[in-house]
Amino acid sequence: MQQYFSLKGRTALVTGGSRGIGKMIAQGFLEAGARVIICSRKKDECEATAAELGQYGECIAVSADLSSEEGAKALFADLQAHTQHLDILVNNAGTSWGAKLEDFPVKGWEKVMQLNVTSVFSCIQQLLPMLRKAGNAESPARVINIGSVAGISAFGEEAYSYGPSKAAVHQLSRMLAKELVGEHINVNVIAPGRFPSKMTSHIHTDPEALAEDCRHIPMKRWGREEEMSALAIMLASTAGAYMTGNIIPIDGGFTL
């Protein structure tokens, strides 16, 4: 079955690929044979990750600030030096904001919605020419947007803008999946539950907090890096060629 999950000869871009879920997916793609470009706002951190992941295959670092439309346009321009087509786009870059209801500021909405929703739209919009060049009836180009179980459940943890932003990503992805399917571009969403990342470091580095958190997960544990990688590989490979418009939780049963 290995041929169905191979990414050999394909080029992928993973935004926010220098750490966390983005790094997990980038490593998985490399191990499956893809050429991977990762981008991050922090140039040094991105280059260090690319050097680390270089043991698995060709990994290229590109600096990108996706907090504005100009940043997405600049990313497209910078990619021209590395590729003219894009088989796989993973929109992973994101942020969160936590505060009590009475104190939650408007800027906590503006920042989260801009990076988690608007930048996803801008990246797809700007990179469409590359995706169109790559996709065909036998092997559609793939867009994989990283949503969240927070966009499905109401377990909000005082991050009032985060869940709504991810629900918006889910709906945007459905809309784009329907619109782009005729151009041989598939759009799907991975909706992670708990995985180790900078955003969740305050929990997974504290044994008591981690044990308490796991009580809410039917499998009683967090996700493993290779589990995230494997799902992304499936969606990006021949195995996922007939899938579009899906929101797929990977959460140990949390949304149940």
Image (tube, rainbow, N blue to C red):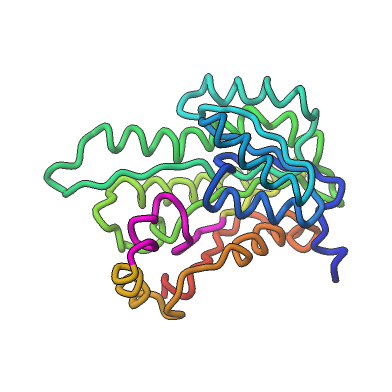
| Residue 146, position as x, y percentages in the image | 53, 50
Answer whether residue 80 is magenta in the image.
no
Image x and y of residue 162, in percent: 35, 48
**Which residue is at the far left?**
102
User: Who is closer to the viewer here, 21 or 111?
Assistant: 21
Q: Residue at x 24, y 53 (%)?
A: 158
Q: Quadrant of residue 221?
A: bottom left
Residue at point 40%, 75% (across, down): 217
Instruction: Identify whether 142 is placed above or below 39.
Output: below
Total marks in image: 0
Residue 83: give x, y in percent of width and height.
Answer: 79, 30
Location of residue 26 in the rendering, given as x and y in whole percent from the top left corner = 66, 49
Residue 198 vs residue 179: left or right? left
**Is residue 106 among the parts visible in the rendering?**
yes
Q: Nearer the viewer, residue 12 or 256?
A: 12
- Where is 75 relative to 169, above or below? above
Residue occupying the point 77% across, 63% down = 239
Question: In the image, 61: left or right of 33?
Answer: left
Quadrant housing residue 233? bottom right
The magenta stretch is 190-206
Residue located 35% across and 69% down the image? 210
Q: Quadrant of the N terminus?
A: bottom right
Quick check: can you spot residue 182?
no
Foreground of the two, 62 or 50: 50
Say left or right for 131 vs 178: right
Is 196 one of the magenta-colored residues? yes
Q: Quadrant of the C terminus?
A: bottom left
